[in-house]
Amino acid sequence: MRAGFIAEEIAAGFRRNLTMTLAVIVTIAASLSLFGAGLLVRAQVSTMKDYWYDKVEVSIYLCSDASDTPSCSGGAVTPAQRKQIRADLKQMAPLVQQVYYESQQQAYQRFIKQFKNSAIVQNVSATALPESFRVKLSNPEKYEVIASAFTGRAGIEQVQDQRRLLDRFFKLLNGLQTIALGIALAMLLVTVLLVVNTMRVAAYSRRREVGIMRLVGASNWYVQLPFIAEAAISAAIGALVATGVIASIKHFGIDQRLAPSYQFTSFIGWDAVWSIVPLVFAVGVGISVVAAAATLRRHLRV
Amino acid sequence: MIRLQGVTKLYRNQNNPAVEDISLEIAKGEFVFLVGSSGSGKSTLLRLMLKEDRPTRGTIHVAGKDLNRLPTWKVPALRRTIGTVFQDFRLLRNKTVEQNIAFALEVIGRPKAEVAVEVPRVIEMVGLAGKEKRYPEELAGGEQQRVAVARAFVNRPALLLADEPTGNLDPTTSVGIMTLLDRINRTGTTVVMATHDANIVDQMRKRVIQLDHGQLVRDQARGVYGYLS
């Protein structure tokens, strides 16, 4: 093994094939950035799930003057009804772990806090928000038990499982993630084609050297290594750029913009970024090297 | 050194075989001319010995190895025991004389120290001392072919295959190349040279194997190019 000699060959390959190599680097950087962004969304969804599933409750909204469901035909909930509902809920232990009561005024305070950055606050008054019981279940999957026991009962406007609302939101995020990963996949395919083409051009432009190497008995390893190393280095540079993009999304996008504005939820930390980066490198370099090796097998056969 | 048994090579899309049912044996240390007109199958035979092609039928042994049974990954090892010289020199234009020769050692992973010793030695031997830093285009045709011979010989192969090495050279220069090949042969290296240069064959009086339309038509020790009348 002659490391110095091989390094010279690789450098010569880069010089000879500069434009194609740049094209490979840019394509790999773009596709890996998207790939990384998709993984960031996935990490974010999982962080939010952990955060929210821990906090979600079943909300039992009580009738107010503004309610118009059939169970509220008797007008706003009466103190007696309220007392009875609370007692019934308490009886449902151990499924019902905890019961909080939230008055209209408390609901309004919480609303203002959550949406302080939104203009919607000005259009909502305390009386527009219903009072509610917030019920924490020992097993959130058993939501139906609560729903069937309380839905339609006089004085209760609606029983709502917050988890279902969240699931709808997570579905949206999952959709975004799928789109990002789909585009990333398409771009990785483009990358493969580009690497294949680059290797073909590289093999052609060095056909004299390669011909002599084969003639004097250079092993396949020696013949192909400069080409494969060229592909691997281009991919690594692309992955480095993509890492920069992913870190920028985390730093500028999440830490500096989203996190200060949406304090009611949690966001991914740097640990999530550092677990994505090795994957981005592995996928980028792996795809590039495999594509290069497969091409060379056809074009540099002994 | 070389043994061919019933070797036939049929190229795709061609009706007539390039070589047909060739059997011959070349001993270690021999100097053999392979003669015949263009298209008679000389180059095909050399390609088969290098395992650049597989025979359609028959077996080929080179340096004790059955080429049909030689796995692909062992082909480089075979070629390290064979030096090759071509009509068109096949030098790298962007490398100097010594770089061209060193390349042959570097790509088979020889250590730097060995390259530093062997390259000047072989340059001296082929008579190019003082021209180490020249580029191929600064050399005359005969000198370029000397570089090619040096590159083929620097690894001290047991067998040297030369395909029309004097085809692009004038008679005087050709004699110089032949002297060089003869000297290499005297070191114990088997030399097989394809040519249709009658003068050279007649002067050297070595073994002559003649091909015609892919058939072996003559195998004569100390022969000449044409038949002796």
Image: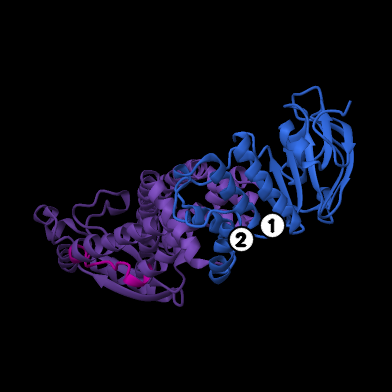
Chain colours: A purple, B blue
Chain at tag 2: B
Which residue appears at 27% of the width and 65% of the height?
A: A132
Which of the labelled discs sits on residue A18, or is there none?
Answer: none
Left or right? Give the position of A63 relative to B7.
left
Left or right? Give the position of A62 relative to B71.
left
Left or right? Give the position of A30 relative to B146.
left
- Where is residue B37? Give x, y as percent: 75, 26
- Where is residue B210? Give x, y as percent: 83, 33
CA gap, disc 2 and disc 1 = 8 Å
Find the residue positioned furthest to the left.
A122
Chain at tag 1: B
Task: Give the residue at mark 2.
Answer: B108
> Is A266 within the magenta?
yes
Disc 1 residue crowd, few under 14, some 14–19, many 20+, Cα 10 Å = many
SS label for mark 2: loop
Q: Nearer the viewer, residue A204 or B219?
A: B219
Query: What residue range appears in magenta?
Result: A259-272
Task: Give the residue at mark 1.
Answer: B80
Q: Are marks 2 and 1 in contact (CB under 8 Å)?
A: yes
